[in-house]
Amino acid sequence: MMSASDLVKIHGLNPAFADKIAQLISNLEVAGLQPRVTSGFRDPIKQKTMQQAWDATDDAGRIKLGLRARPATDSLHNRVDGSKKNALAVDIKSTDEKRAGAIAESLGIGAGINFRTPDPGHYYDLKAQKARQIKIVGGSGLGTIAVAVGAFFLYKMLRKKR
């Protein structure tokens, strides 16, 4: 079994996320799914290279490269904390990706098998993903909240005048 400290040292995972992934790996082993970590931290250059490889080939070529989905531009695999690798995503192959995804979700870990374009074997920190979505969708945060509150009060004011 791979320990959380091994996941931090060897694969560059965030320590708290590594604890969850070590638990996931243990559960996958108990279930007989033969988990194998294939990717943790990726530097931005490797991420970009993987995107270019995806874009330059067809499905057969992507399978040969081991790519199951187009690598994201803003990936949780690329996270750093200062100069330390701090990945909040990991790729783990197993013998039954659907079952592995269900086990991950039961532990509060996000599973790429459920993406709009499924990415079996991709697991990520749910809190980090949600925070990233809010940042992308919501812009600067406080400004977005101010606009929403302002729109709410404008709606209430207009409603009273009727």
Image: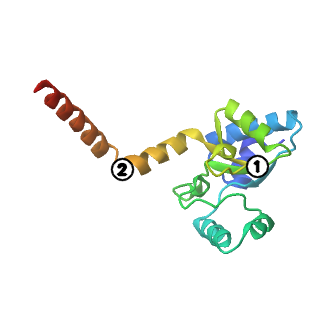
In-image side of 99 versus 87 (left or right): right
In-image side of 10 versus 88 (left or right): right
Q: Where does residue 135 sit, x and y in percent of width and height?
A: 42, 48
- The three-letter code of the residue at mark 1 reads Ile
Q: Where does residue 112 sit, x and y in percent of width and height?
A: 66, 46
Tell me the quarter of the image containing the N terminus: top right
In-image side of 91 versus 140 (left or right): right
Q: How is the image coloured?
A: rainbow
Picture quadrant where residue 145 is located: top left
* Disc number for residue 92: 1
In-image side of 121 versus 77 (left or right): right
Residue at point 67%, 58% (across, down): 69
Residue at point 71%, 36% (across, down): 104
Q: Mark 2 points at which residue?
A: 139
Kindly state the secondary structure of the residue where label 2 is placed: loop
Kindly state the secondary structure of the residue where label 1 is placed: strand
Tell me the quarter of the image containing the C terminus: top left
- The three-letter code of the residue at mark 2 reads Gly
